[in-house]
Amino acid sequence: LLNRSNSGRETITVKWTDIGFSNDQAAVVRDLWARKDLGIFTGSFTSPSINYHSVIMLKITPTRNK
């Protein structure tokens, strides 16, 4: 996720429907640079504040439906 703002910090929301997942899909979100799982989210993920012109690299993996 890239904060394209010219100043300040921003949060960015990834909606599952924007990346090809269904809105009711649960997915594991992992911060690749921090090497840390951020949790399991359904429908979307909102990042922590990202500095302007900074990036967070995520891996979003759908969980298996039971």
Image (cartoon, grey):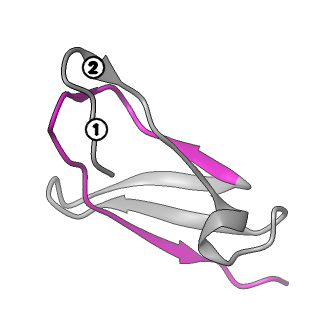
Looking at the image, which residue is at 19% across and 17% down?
7
Give the x, y percent position of residue 62: 61, 77
**Given contact means CB atoms under 8 Å apart, are the residues at marks 2 and 1 in contact?**
yes
Give the x, y percent position of residue 64: 71, 85
Looking at the image, which residue is at 77% across and 69% down?
25
Q: Is residue 52 magenta?
A: yes
Give the x, y percent position of residue 14: 55, 52
Q: Give the quarter of the image for residue 30.
A: bottom left
Q: Would you say 22 lies left or right of 64 here?
A: right
Q: Which mark is residue 9?
A: 2
Q: Give the quarter of the image for residue 24.
A: bottom right
Q: Helix or strand or loop: what does disc 1 sit on?
A: loop
Which segment is the magenta one? 44-66
The alpha-carbon separation of the residues under discs 2 and 1 comes to 8 Å
Q: Residue furthest front?
A: 6
Which residue carries the number 1 mark? 3
Amino acid at circle 2: Arg
- Answer few, some or many: residues within 10 Å of disc 2's Cα (few below 14, many 20 plus, some between 14 and 19): some
Looking at the image, which residue is at 81% across and 62% down?
23
Q: Would you say 15 lies left or right of 57 here?
A: right
- Answer few, some or many: residues within 10 Å of disc 1's Cα (few below 14, many 20 plus, some between 14 and 19): some
